[in-house]
Amino acid sequence: MPRLYVPVAMQVGTLELPAAAKRHLHVLRLRGGDAVELFDGTGGEWQARVLDNARVEVLGHDAIERELDVRVTLALAMPANERMDWLVEKATELGAAQLQPLQSARSVLRLHGERAQRRQAHWQAIAEAACAQCGRNRVPQVLQVRELDDWLGTLPAPRPTQARCLLAAPAHGAASSYAAWSAGPGAVAEVLALSGPEGGLEAGEIASAGAAGFAAVSLGPRVLRAETAPLALLAALAVR
């Protein structure tokens, strides 16, 4: 079923589509009478049929959700080149609820000011398109780019139902295995995962993360790329 992201209030009846949804309707080559699903990013989806190249008839709402059973925020030291685009897309498909782009001491990609705002908007659009493709009805939020130290300094104390993990390389002697960490005590409703850049986090950054409640977690004996590690964690959480 073709899906359109329509971030407006919806109800049964005729709906004039916003400009972006009209363009998507054209790209999909949908015509009058074709069935389509609409979602506004806040939950559930709407069944509809196309009336013309600008309007649909909304027929009814379905409260179906396709989310993980825990809310996952990925705090990512941004990988360079186009790999951050790919990471946002795949993290959305795998169920991340929020993405926090970060700059750390060894980060290659550096963004500031208007350039950072443009990239944030670009990544948010990627997340919206990925939701339309994969069937999610809640669009993850891509937050503004932050410096790692500043971000760590503003974090509140972890809630009892929140688990915090620092994705560590296998050589990190203090790291727990994922199996041991995920079997920890208590019911966890949220996971906040911190992942470093291509060159890893510096010792001082690792210490600061530990002071903020992050437990070092290893995902296995192999060294994973900066864009692979957070996706491996999401996949593990999805099938646990």
Image: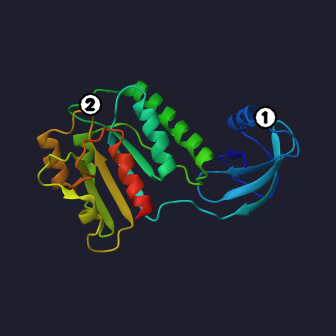
Q: Amino acid at mark 2?
A: Ser
Query: Would you identify the image quadrant in which residue 52 lies?
Result: top right
Q: Is residue 46 left or right of residue 76?
A: right
Work out whether residue 180 or residue 67 is closer to the camera in this orientation and state it: 180
With respect to residue 58, does 145 lie above or below? above
Work out whether residue 207 or residue 16 is closer to the camera in this orientation and state it: 207
The colour mode here is rainbow
Residue extending furthest front? Answer: 221
Whether residue 157 is visible to the viewer of this picture, yes or no, is yes
With respect to residue 89, does 27 lie above or below? above
Crowding at mark 1 (Cα within 10 Å: few <14, some 14-19, many 20+):
few
Q: Is residue 204 left or right of residue 9?
A: left
Which tag, 1 or 2, sits closer to the chain's start? 1
Q: Residue at x 79, y 34 (%)?
A: 29
Residue 183 screen position, x and y as percent: 28, 69
Residue 132 screen position, x and y as percent: 62, 45
For disc 1, the marked residue is 29
The label shown at residue 190 is none
CA distance separating discs 1 and 2: 42 Å
The label shown at residue 107 is 2
**Callout 2: SS:** loop
Residue 70 screen position, x and y as percent: 42, 63
Residue extending furthest bottom? Answer: 186
Q: Residue at x 70, y 38 (%)?
A: 21
**Callout 1: SS:** loop
Whether residue 140 is visible to the viewer of this picture, yes or no, is no
